[in-house]
Image (cartoon, grey):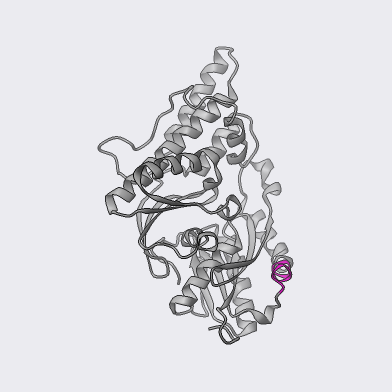
Amino acid sequence: MADRAGEEALVLGFETSCDETGVGLVRGHTLLADALATSMAEHERFGGVVPEIASRAHLEAMVPTVHRALADAGATIDDVDAVAVTSGPGLTGALLVGVAAAKAYALALGKPLYGVNHLAAHVAVDELQHGPLAEPSIALLVSGGHSSLLLVPDLAREVESLGRTVDDAAGEAFDKVARVLGLPFPGGPPIDRAAREGDPAAISFPRGLTGPRDAPYDFSFSGLKTAVARWIEARERAGEPVPVADVAASFQEAVADVLTAKAVRACRDHGVDHLVLGGGVAANSRLRALAEERCSAAGIVLRVPSPKLCTDNGAMVAALGSRLVAAGVAPSAPDLGADSSLPIETVSR
């Protein structure tokens, strides 16, 4: 599709599903630029992402971030062969900013536009680091809004949901536990740091949905979050100090235990020997270590992108767009919109 003979298409990707404005440039499986602007500091005092603030920040950051990505790649806007954008799932207002920007660039350049699924993009980004994805693969995606197990027979056309969170996603649980421990938002990194000084076996926190009658691939972290809060409250009522490091380590162990056990089970049940770990919580050191340990023992090849590529970014959207272009998938219609609840089975629209 590239205008230059013999070259793969240069894809410009936009990611605005939450609080990060990401713009990436990818050619084939090669990442040329990954520019990011975040409004996280503006949300900290609220203890969570405020949609209106995120949307306004995307508007302000969009054009400068595009310019930075092009400069980093040593390219001009006229070099772009296709445009990809997250059209869902995510925060509606934030998604709309990205979709509008992508449509404007695609129209001005006369290039095809691909509206892609945010979750599928988290899988695609691994190809930038480890090459073509083995198909089929199992993907475990863990973030602030999603905990999902996916079967991926064909990343460009077919993704099947095996299980998902039924209440709080893992990232939400990290944020809420961090709050009761007096740690900063977002909760993932500070809990990970605190846990390094703690004992993961100090406190026996519950493992949700792990009974013989529970859904084998679904996740529930609401009960775990509540159990941690109740344990802390009991210590405080008794006038005893709260061992922050031990609580963090024990909580983190409970999350990693459930996630990795279910992912390995899904691989075994479906006869798949490749597991991809992605999403913001995939940057957690204990989750990565336990996944490696259990996959190694089960003869499963584990693929985990670098922590920078696990969080929301434009590179992952451009990577999926590149995969769609290479597979000959039809571009999106000009009236492409945002869908905050876009199902994972819809890879592109």
Is 117 left, or right, of 71 in this rendering?
A: left
The residue positioned 40% from the left and 38% from the top of the image is 258
> What is the quadrant of the C terminus in the image?
bottom left
Q: Position of residue 98 (x, y in %)?
A: 60, 67
Q: Is residue 329 visible?
A: no
Extreme residue toward the left, this view = 213
- Residue at 55% from the left image edge and 30% from the top image edge: 248
Q: Position of residue 58 (x, y in %)?
A: 67, 61
Of residues 166 and 134, the one drawn nearer to the viewer in this rendering: 134
Dividing the picture into quadrants, the one containing residue 67 is: bottom right
Quarter-of-image position of residue 65: bottom right
Q: Is residue 245 magenta?
A: no
Q: Is residue 86 above or below residue 249?
A: below
Q: Magenta region: which residues?
A: 66-74
Position of residue 5 relative to residue 74, above or below, is below
Tell me where residue 12 appears, x and y as whole percent: 61, 72
**Magenta highlight on residue 67:** yes
To which quarter of the image does residue 257 belong? top left
User: Does 193 appear above or below 114?
Assistant: above
In the displayed structure image, the side of residue 235 where residue 348 appears, left or right: left
Q: Position of residue 206 (x, y in %)?
A: 40, 29
Magenta: main secondary structure = helix
